[in-house]
Image: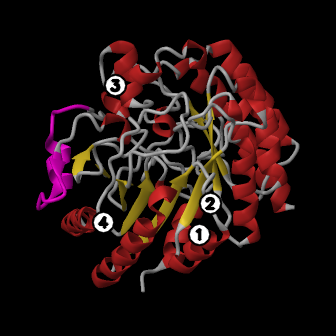
Amino acid sequence: MFNQNLLNNHTAMGQCDCDCDCACAIALPNDWFIASEEAVPSIPVDCPFLLAAWLHLTDRCNLRCDYCYTAHTAADMSLPLGRAAIDATFRSAVTHSYRAVKLKYAGGEPLLRFPLALELHRYAQTLAEKHGIILDGIVLSNGTLLTAEMVEQMQTTGLRLMISLDGIGATHDCQRRYADGRGSFAEVVRAIEMAQVGGLTPNISITISGRSIEGLPEVVAWVLDRDLPFSLNFYREYSCAACHTDLSLENERMIAGMLSAYKLIEGNLPHRSLLASLADRANLAAPHLRTCSAGQSYLVFDTQGRISKCQMDMAYPVTDCHDPDPLGTLRSSTLGLQSPTVDEKEECRECQWRYACGGGCPLQAHRATGRYDGKSPYCAIYKVLYPEVVRLEKLRLLKYAE
């Protein structure tokens, strides 16, 4: 079988588990960025260790989250197309000498197609074993449809679970509601507790918007009290959510809310490193040239087997699952998203944090500036947060060194 211990070690050293797939690099030890808060890494890492693939199992969802970028149609991925997508992923992994493949079973709400996720992951395991490739799989869910039987099946199949929780009570419900307008908080908490009872520790994805920022400390306290891994992700503006102007992030409010959450974390430091979890797409655990692997080491398959560079850019498919080398085609494509390195971004070249940040989301930069190599609209927020993330990691290391 594939070497799960190697993957676990790689993850523990800074590989982010969030659904944005940030900084897919061979990570360095946790003290890499701890020597000085003014440190400038000399050797950024941009090597092909892990190829990630997003499998869009369905457009259908039982929620109507205000920031969702997916059109909720009746489209579903078929089993033959799903197998073809996995075949395509492993073809490119072998061609480009990747040592690991990470499959993200997503939607829509992937638990609506849970039997398909299980079938596809079992198929992927056979290919991973055949090619000697490390395999990781994660279900990205809103949690509301989770059952104890699903938890048991994920455990048996080796699937991990990510659940979205944006706040406590009304803070979560104000942006993650059912189609009929009801809030989903109670069901999400039920799912998290069910998973934990079943021995499956879910990773918690917290999306922060202008609507939810004041409630951030409360939800961070909640996940810390339960010793849950989590990631803090900033709301991404896009056309479908343009009418929800209160989701937009204002620098001063955002910084104040984030620092309040950090102060709370300081009083309850977890055993696990938070270098890749506390500042949106940034990964301070290892130097890297790009914020995420979109356009480089990432394949996004829609329900029809078409392949895009990012799940937020599925309107611009580049190729499909029948391509002999979809990753090669995607990398050479000038259509849609472009992902320049941080050193190619004029406004980022001299920044001391550039190899931790990677320059920010290129899609977000393009929306704000009209350029993929433009400055992130969240740059000012990031520069305040990064030193604090490093300081928290120092305190955490000192605490557990004792």
Name the residue that disc number 1 marks. 150
Query: CA–CA distance between discs 2 and 4?
Result: 32 Å
Mark toward the viewer: 3 or 1 = 1
User: Quarter of the image containing the N terminus?
Assistant: bottom left
Residue 239: percent from the left, percent from the top? Answer: 39, 20
Query: Mark 1 belongs to which amino acid?
Result: Met
Label 3: element kind: loop
Residue at 73 percent of width and 64 percent of height: 194
Q: Is residue 94 above or below residue 21?
A: below
Residue named by callout 4: 98
Type of amino acid at the residue the image marks with label 4: Tyr
Q: Residues within 10 Å of mark 1 (few under 14, many from 20)?
A: some
Residue type, label 2: Leu
Q: Do labels 3 and 2 touch, CB within 8 Å?
A: no
Range of residues picked out in magenta: 319-336
The CA distance from mark 1 to mark 2 is 6 Å
Gap between marks 3 and 1 measured at Cα: 45 Å
Q: Which mark is residue 345?
A: 3
Between 220 and 74, the one nearer to me in the picture: 74
Q: Nearer the viewer, residue 330 or 24?
A: 330
Q: Earlier in the sequence, mark 1 or mark 4?
A: 4
Q: Are marks 1 and 2 in contact (CB under 8 Å)?
A: yes
Left or right: where does residue 165 sit relative to residue 242? right
Q: Which residue lies under the disc numbered 2?
A: 146
Determine which quarter of the picture holds residue 129. Answer: bottom left
Sequence-first disc among 3 and 1? 1
